[in-house]
Amino acid sequence: MNQKATYVIMAFSLFLLGISLRGRGPGPGVTYVTLKLPDSLPKPAYDFSKNPLTKEGIALGRYLFYDPKLSRDSSVSCGFCHQQFAAFGHFDHALAHGVYGRMGTRSVPTLFNLIWQKDFMWDGGVNHLDIQPMSPITAENEMDMPLNELIERLKCNEKYQQMFKAAYGTEEVTSQRMFKALAQFMATMISFDSKYDSVKRRAPGVAFTPEEAGGYSTFQQKCAGCHKEPFFTDFSVRNNGLPYSPNMNDMGRMRITNNTGDYMKFKVPSLRNVLVSAPYMHDGRFFDIFQVFAMYDHGQEKGSTVDPLVRGMQLSPKEQRQLYMFLNTLTDKHFLKNAEYSEVMIAD
Amino acid sequence: MILIMKYVNSFCHSQKLFFFAYFRFMNRLLLFFFLLIGKAAVSQSVTLTLTHEVNHQPMRANKAYYTAQGDTFTITKFKYYLSNFSFTDENERVLQLSPEYFLVSDDSAASKKIVLTGLPLGRYKAVSFMIGVDSIMNCTGAQSGALDPVYGMFWTWNSGYIMAKLEGTSPASRLPGHALQFHIGGYRGAHQSQRMVQLKVPFAVTAENTAHINLVADAATWFNGPNPIRFSETAGFMAPGTVGDRIADNYSHMFSVKTK
């Protein structure tokens, strides 16, 4: 065969291939990033082949996360409610805050180990990490920002033009690119470095105190059915017996499925970093973990959808004290202070 | 060929592997190239033009129409997704086109003209498509193009596309401003709102001409079909659910082929 012709065809085909792939994935010259995860963990639910992590993508995601321009009046960023020192929950706030002093109806969930999670929000109504931010960004009582206006706003910003170009090869701002960058940043929020994890991997010189060990055994008997190790949640929605609140009229999962069998079912939250992320429950009604223990011990509401695993649970004062000691070992100080997640100051 | 194989056999193992890999790579590239230049000769595009009507009259903003139940109403917004096009030829063979998604909106003339490419030459007798977006695109993250959520056709609190949207007013509506708001969606479980449509339409795809198909979508079917809607009872529905399923059943009869 004529070699020259082969080369010409080859070059042309590559050129065509280049055109068809343009603007889809990461841009040229990006630095790919691989998450360092403990070997013992299952495969993440998040499909990284559709959104490969890059240094530039993560940086863009972090910038977006801390940019108040994502809200209507440029006052509330994602990081406004999701505070790193509270494991990306909202310290001391029962309910989410929004623009113009508005307030939401649910508490701010913590953010970590999200790449194993399939459903998001307290009622599991959002089905993918990529599109989760759409909910708080557009919600009237949170950031109240219509998506099309937000994309226009970012397009006109020089800093974003540079950052989108670095991450994706062109300056084009699309909602898909924005969501994927946010997902990349959130995907890096991994918390598996608590005292519990050190004990589990038999790190030298680390052991549970007798109180912590007692708490761990109570946890395994009474809590681990739903708050399953190693994530300390089984990612399901359940009714934990929390009394219905007429003030909030929130029936949880039932709103999503229209099924009365889902009355008062809410997502099982992870217990990792639980002692730094008060208040508790979907409506933040408990500011102290001992109120949560008390609810399980004697404050449950009866009902057909209450999970059999929590019905009739009893926690003695000793068990409660030891549980508290054990939950303390789930605080991951490295995660709470990791400089890679810290706030970026955005002045414009 | 035998000569080539003999030549290849004289290679050491790694050379052989490389040769085969190279051979396969070149083959693919050539195939790709020929497919590209070959396309023009063996396939053509089909243009679908959509016209919106209400009770067989042209759809106009703020014009009054009647349902079969006697309710007066106007339409201010009319949008829907079409996807998963396939064609049946005279030999009953079904040709599924590569997945593409189109958002048709009454206020955008450009959206009412859909060009489908890659249909092999031949004589056809029917077209099929989905009103809505298939489940896979509802649960695989952030999408682009017609599926970009900036078009307001995505539910943020209960993930999934709004397959079709009709908004307007009716004096019978008890909603504020006598509004009508029907956002039909739901892609899983008991409430799946995607509807397949098949329409008989004879046409030929030849190398010389692009085929044209004129479709009419009659919005009155939303309320008049097998499940009649009274605006005094139901003036809006904006979640996956039974009412949405019923309206989707109604509007699955919305399309017809216009013959001049």
Image (tube, coloured by chain):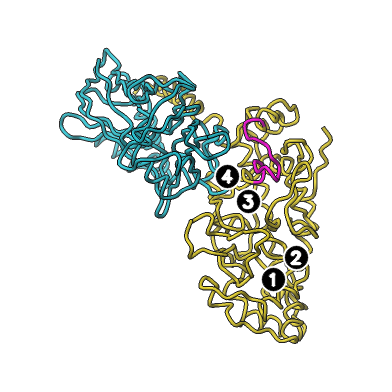
Chain colours: A yellow, B cyan
Q: Earlier in the sequence, mark 1 or mark 2?
A: 1
Same subunit, labels 3 and 4: the answer reads no
Residue A246: x, y in percent?
65, 62
Check if mark 2's residue and mark 4's residue have beta carbons within 8 Å. Answer: no
Pointers 1 and 2 in contact (CB under 8 A)? Answer: yes
Coordinates of residue A55 in the picture (x, y in percent): 69, 43
Residue shown at the point (33%, 32%) measured from the top left: B254
Nearer to us: label 4 or label 1: 4
What distance separates the C-alpha of mark 2 from that of mark 3?
21 Å
Q: Are marks 2 and 4 on the same chain?
A: no
* Spatial CA span between label 4 and label 1: 35 Å
Give the answer, above or below, for where B185 lies relative to B76.
below
Mark 4 — residue? B156
Badge count: 4
Callout 1: chain: A
- In the image, A270 versus B257, the foreground residue is B257
